[in-house]
Amino acid sequence: MSETINNESLITNDVKTTLLEAKNLSHEFDYKLFENINLTLEKKESIAIIGMSGSGKSTLLNILSSLLEPKSGEITFNKENIYAVKKNRLLNIRREDFGIIFQAHYLFRGFSANDNLEIATLLSGEPIDNTLLKKLNIDFVINQGVGELSGGQQQRLSIARVLTKKPKIIFADEPTGNLDKETAQVVMNTLRTYIKENDAGMILVTHENELAMACDKVYKLENLQLQELK
Ligand SMILES: Nc1ncnc2c1ncn2[C@@H]1O[C@H](COP(=O)(O)OP(=O)(O)OP(=O)(O)O)[C@@H](O)[C@H]1O
Ligand SMILES: [Mg+2]
């Protein structure tokens, strides 16, 4: 009897470990960027995408994160095709399950750092995590206005804001672009710890090989394809 239950739970677990699945994605603007790309993100997994400037990394991340419909192909999140569901459902997925860290961060500039975090707690019902703020070394600037923060502090604040939402998947486009090496490492460790502790996943675009290699899987976007490097 107990064996049957174990088997069943194994099967259920197995099915549930896939967070995001992309099938046969193709996209182009003025020229073809990629063709028939497939990608699977599992729980607790981090994937890095590297490639030359203009190869289409940000475009691919936008497509994966629900912001841009691909020319062809489909993306499923927990078995739901994100570009086929009703608009309200997609907004909910984007608000509750996806945490998107942009190349340029969009903080509310007239407000304090703390106000910006409160907005995320309003959306998610999750409290602000002071340990996280300490880890990112921004706890001491939390009452300052966004305009009074350094570029790197703003970047870490926008990462803290995304994590405060407790997303299931983090999509990050050059999240450490403005940071010195040591701080970049802290941010990467924070993101990786987050996904391991929360059964979440991460897809990250970066120019820095060292940071990419710290992820579980690494792909290079080249010749219209994702070449697996790790
Ligand atoms: N909305 C758009 N309309 C038209 N062309 C676009 C659009 N977005 C991106 N492109 C073009 O698609 C190509 C790929 O852009 P993308 O931003 O995906 O590159 P990237 O790999 O992220 O580059 P980088 O490393 O410089 O950030 C570029 O030639 C860009 O000009
Ligand atoms: Mg880009």
Image (tube, helix red, strand yellow):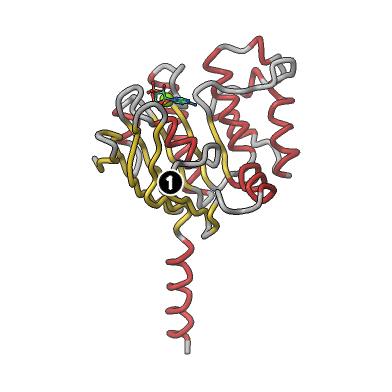
Q: Residues within 10 Å of mark 1 (few under 14, many from 20)?
A: few
Can residue 163 be seen here? The reply is yes
Furthest residue toward bottom: 1
Q: Is residue 224 above or below residue 23?
A: above
Q: Which residue is mark 1?
A: 72
Left or right: residue 184 versus residue 126 is left
Can residue 230 be seen here? The reply is no
Which element is circle 1 on?
strand
Left or right: residue 66 versus residue 39 is right
Residue at the (64%, 40%) spot, across then down? 165
**Residue 55, quarter of picture:** top left
Instruction: Look at label 1 and name its amino acid.
Output: Ser
**Residue 35, quarter of picture:** top left
> CB of residue at label 1: within 8 Å of ligand 1?
no
* Quadrant the C terminus occupies: top left
User: Where does residue 50 sit, x and y in percent of width and height?
Assistant: 32, 31
Q: Which quadrant of the render holds ligand 1?
A: top left
Q: Is residue 110 above or below residue 50?
A: above
Residue at the (34%, 22%) spot, across then down? 53
Residue at the (39%, 33%) spot, across then down? 28
User: Where does residue 93 sit, x and y in percent of width and height?
Assistant: 62, 48
Left or right: residue 130 versus residue 152 is right
How many marks the image carries: the answer is: 1
Q: Nearer the viewer, residue 80 or 122?
A: 80
